[in-house]
Image (tube, rainbow, N blue to C red):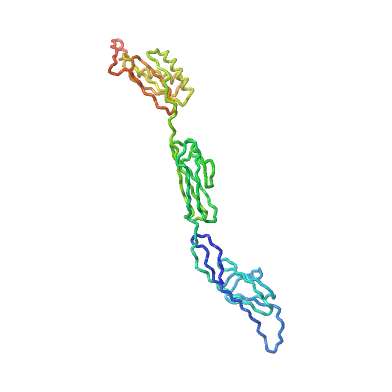
């Protein structure tokens, strides 16, 4: 007799081949005790069991009866149908119904031979395809979707990892599909990594895949630097009034900076442009409280007259460049008097 074993989910072994069971049931009558004795009608029948190997748990009519032996074990029972259950070494229960008659012996000899293991067909490895847009605009929501072909019966787990860390996962954690917010990630690439696992612990049942999406850098904003004011041959009091107005603009928009171009005149003293630029910066810092880091001063070269040019530059805008109108070779320095020379020395 051959019996199927329950399937085993281990990828190395699937289900055992049919176990070979040899069960012989014999019917014997009781011998007479003597030739001259009068036979008494029998009230019971006998069930005898022997197994190879010995030591298998046995039940008769639903009640445990210890273990089998390699010799015969006997149970007397009333006539009728009786059930014998033997637990095999592989855990399966061999069951047989025996019709017992009074005065009769029913013998069961069971020989268990396990079959050779048969390699199981594992559902692993299984393919996992991850789809996502290759490029989106900053601020769009990106959807990453996994398509998994798995023929096993175990539930799959989905573990997502997204980089950079500033990429915000909006939903779908633990499922085959997640959504990611790309806001603020212009000029970067978002990489989504997915681990799919069936929980069996087998390395081939843990599949990893990736998909990436690029967010192009934003175009420069339409907010260029603008010339705020220019003062030529101005008195310092006039310049201070213009610098006050500039300070108000800088305080209203803390993201802006100011560029100050100071020009020496065609006949100005040596170092005049540097003096004008330094004086304007010092006034903004000491009198108006502007952060020095927001003030950029350049010596712009020469113009016909001393000049100070004020610019407001928004964040990210292209900085302005000086615009001199007189070449350095055309500048005529005034002749210094003896008293001015002594004061300079």
In the image as oriented, which residue stretches furthest toward the bottom? Answer: 36
Residue at 55 percent across and 65 percent down: it is 5
Residue at 53 percent across and 60 percent down: it is 9
Residue at 51 percent across and 60 percent down: it is 10
Q: Residue 235 in the image: x percent, y percent?
A: 40, 12
Q: Is residue 345 above or below residue 202?
A: above
Residue 294 can be seen in this image: no
Q: In this view, does 234 lie to the left or right of 81?
A: left
Dividing the image into 4 quarters, which one contains the C terminus?
A: top left
For residue 303, what is the image quadrant?
top left
For residue 172, what is the image quadrant?
top right
User: Of residues 323 and 308, which is closer to you in this image?
Assistant: 323
Q: Residue 25 in the image: x percent, y percent?
A: 61, 76
Q: Residue 152 in the image: x percent, y percent?
A: 53, 56
Q: Is residue 269 above or below residue 67?
A: above
User: Of residues 337 and 105, which is closer to you in this image?
Assistant: 105
Residue 280 can be seen in this image: yes
Dividing the image into 4 quarters, which one contains the N terminus?
A: bottom right
For residue 342, what is the image quadrant?
top left
Q: Residue 87 in the image: x percent, y percent?
A: 59, 68
User: Of residues 111 and 14, which is closer to you in this image?
Assistant: 14
User: Of residues 209 and 337, which is closer to you in this image?
Assistant: 209
Q: In this view, does 65 lie above or below 171?
A: below
Number of marks in the rendered image: 0
Q: In this view, does 140 lie above or below 237?
A: below
């Amino acid at each position: 007799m051959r019996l199927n074993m329950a399937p085993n989910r281990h990828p190395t072994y699937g289900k055992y081949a049919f176990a070979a069971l040899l069960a012989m049931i014999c019917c014997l009558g009781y011998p007479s005790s003597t030739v001259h004795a009068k036979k008494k009608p029998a009230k019971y029948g006998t069930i005898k069991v022997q197994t190879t190997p010995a030591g298998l748990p046995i039940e008769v009519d639903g009640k445990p009866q210890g273990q089998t032996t390699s010799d015969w074990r006997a149970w007397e029972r009333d006539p009728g149908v009786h059930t014998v259950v033997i637990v095999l070494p592989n855990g399966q229960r061999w069951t047989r119904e025996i019709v017992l008659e009074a005065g009769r012996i029913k013998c069961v000899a069971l020989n268990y031979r396990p079959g050779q293991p048969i390699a199981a067909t594992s559902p692993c490895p299984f393919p996992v395809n991850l789809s996502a847009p290759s490029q989106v605009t900053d601020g769009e929501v990106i959807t990453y979707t996994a398509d998994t072909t798995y023929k096993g019966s175990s539930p799959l787990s989905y573990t997502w990892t997204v980089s950079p860390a500033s990429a915000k996962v909006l939903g779908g954690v633990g499922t085959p599909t997640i959504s990611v917010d790309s806001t603020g990630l212009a000029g970067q690439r978002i990489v989504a990594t997915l681990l799919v696992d069936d929980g069996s612990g087998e390395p081939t049942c843990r599949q990893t895949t990736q998909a990436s999406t690029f967010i192009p850098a934003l175009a420069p904003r339409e907010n260029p630097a603008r010339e705020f004011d220019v003062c030529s041959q101005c008195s310092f009091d006039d310049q201070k009034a213009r610098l006050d107005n500039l300070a108000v603009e800088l305080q209203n928009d803390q993201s802006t900076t100011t560029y100050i171009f100071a020009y020496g005149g065609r006949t100005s003293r040596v170092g005049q442009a540097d003096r004008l630029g330094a004086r304007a910066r010092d006034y903004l810092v000491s009198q108006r409280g502007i952060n020095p880091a927001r003030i950029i001063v350049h010596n712009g070269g020469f113009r016909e007259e001393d000049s100070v040019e004020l610019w407001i530059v928004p964040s990210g805008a292209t900085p302005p460049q000086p615009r001199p109108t007189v070449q350095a070779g055309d500048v005529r320095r005034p002749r210094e008097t003896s008293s001015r020379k002594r004061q300079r020395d």
